Image: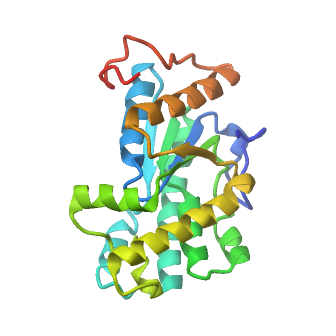
Amino acid sequence: MRPQERCFYGDGIVRTDPATLTGKLVVVEGADGSGRSTQIRLLRDWLEGEGIPTADVGLARSMLVSAELEQAKLGNVLGRTTMSLFYATDFADQLENIIIPAMAAGFVVLADRYIYTLMVRDLVRGADPAWLQCLYGIALVPDLVFHLRVAPRKLAQRTFRKSSELDFWESGMDLGLSRDRFDSFIRYQTLVQRSFATMQDRYHFIEVNGNRSPTLVNRQLREEIAAMLRADGGFEPVPNAASYRPSARLL
């Protein structure tokens, strides 16, 4: 669901009037292996092929702290609050220096995950919901939020095909759910999906069956985005255009 008026979840960024942000913010959420990066790439190619400028953001991409964050995670001993604040800083830097300027220039910003993944990770680890809402009150309310839901065992299979191992943090090994990493991964991802489900109505997620092929998933995302842009009276992208080249007859 699109916000009726551009707004922040809380107090927002100082000296920023959300009404001046004429671009759009589209979020694709989902676990590692859900196909987020593929969908972001396909959406970017499609939109830019229609003459719509885009910008990309994602977790741990801030020029300010991303390198330090990745380094801190290597030892698998990062404290929960420290990790939360690391990611919040990473998000705030990208919000202020990439998302807001791009939207002020009329771009469609494609977010490869947003505050929801960060909140869910922290909630599963016992964080106070009120504290998280305050922490991420700076965030803009997106125009669309897609949640690519994939069965945990299928996520594990996709991850093994891609990297031959399961990530310590994405397996929730710090939670002590199981000594076996595969078992811990299944349990942790199940908890994450349950937490996403409790947030769906409040944050207006569009649940997407990510177990399907990338072609079918992308068709759904493109149809939703095209409807949003048409409703706004702006661009007229054609979801089923036969001349669309980057997707190699995606539809």
Q: Quadrant of the N terminus?
A: top right
Relative depth, front residue between 153 and 131: 153
Q: Position of residue 79 (x, y in %)?
A: 46, 87
Of 208 and 66, nearer the camera is 208
Along the horizontal axis of the image, is 153 left or right of 3? left
Image quadrant in which you'd find residue 245: top left
Horizontal side of 88 relative to 64 (left or right) equals right
Quarter occupied by residue 144:
top right
Q: Which residue does the image show at 37% across and 46% down from the upper left?
A: 37
Residue drawn at x 30%, y 85% is: 75
Q: Position of residue 91 (x, y in %)?
A: 51, 62
Rendered location of residue 112, percent (x, y): 45, 50
Residue 61 in view here:
no
Q: Quadrant of the C terminus?
A: top left
44 vs 138: above or below: above
Q: Position of residue 55 (x, y in %)?
A: 44, 40
- Relative to 202, say whether 1 is above or below: above
